[in-house]
Amino acid sequence: MSTLSGAAPGTVEIPLKQRLAARGLDGLTLLVLPAVIFLLALFIYPFFYGLFLSFNPKAGGALANYQRFFSDSFLYGTIATTLWLAMPVTILTLLLAIPIAFRVRLMKNQRLLTTILVIPITLGTVLVAEGLLNYLGPQGWFNRTLMAIGLISSPVKLLHNYWGVMLSLVITGFPFTFLLTLSYLTGVDPALEQAGATLGAGPWERFKHILLPLLLPGLAITFCLSFVQAFSVFPSAVLLGAPAGPTRVISIAAYQAAFEEYDYSMASAVAMIMGMVQLAIVVAVLGLRGMLYRGPAGGGKG
């Protein structure tokens, strides 16, 4: 074997590529580098910059923005308003997605039906809001149909209130929740259910003792992701809600601080509070999952 020039006799030369690979710097690892740069540029740096900015208010001490937020009911009340929208929407979409996913996975035309169900996710919140304004507005086809058949004498107010925003969030959030639920459900080996049926377990027993424990980790993750998506509601709350009243969510408070008051430090503080609330809910859900289920995080195949 060749030896390194100037090295002690008998020393084996190790190629540079192998030395780098031994330290984890191989070609496969380098493929991750663009993703790391992307993450640093668009997520990590903005987060820490916003955190720094939130502690540099226009006036007062480092905690002045946070003191202002929690001393003003018009500001801190947005947390409850946003939770009152995000939590029911997340629970409702999950409750709708589970039985539909169970049904879809047994159908022959699964791909076709899945495509139809996820179409709203391609429209975006603004287009969905525009559609609801046309269909459910005072002169929309829904109210005109009900008045034409004599069920109501005046239009039902379904928009510019809580229900309009909630309906929009359900429409846009359901495809996302459904796809995640279906992916976890199809990961469960059908042989497990067949074994339970062979041993005399009925549909409810199979769901309770076989499917549900295997789905719990996935459903917890689905809940967290769907909740974060619903909690960051902004277009629907503006277009279909009452931004100055019952649907003044926390994202609107951050927007107003930044682009109406031009107080970017305060806007950053509101954004940090928004993130902390989401993190608290996610940690609570994952902690509850850990209490109820201590098995592997994966499904039942393999």
Image (cartoon, grey):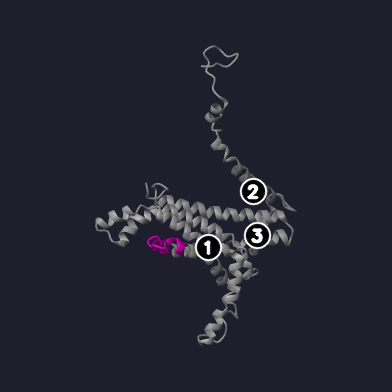
> Which contiguous range is marked in magenta?
99-114
Regarding residue 75, the answer to whether it shows in the image is: no
Regarding residue 200, the answer to whether it shows in the image is: yes
Q: CA distance from mark 3 to mark 1?
A: 33 Å
* Residue pointed to by mark 1: 173
Circle 2 SS class: helix
Q: Quadrant of residue 242?
A: bottom right
Q: Nearer the viewer, mark 3 or mark 1?
A: 1
Q: In the picture shown, does residue 299 fall above or below 237?
A: above
Circle 3 SS class: helix
Tell me which numbered mark, 1 or 2, is placed earlier along the sequence: 2
Q: Is residue 248 magenta?
A: no
Tell me which numbered mark, 3 or 1, is placed earlier along the sequence: 3
Q: Amino acid at mark 2?
A: Leu
* Residue pointed to by mark 3: 71
* Residue pointed to by mark 2: 42
Residue at left offset 49%, top offset 53%: 284
Q: CA distance from mark 1 to mark 2?
A: 24 Å
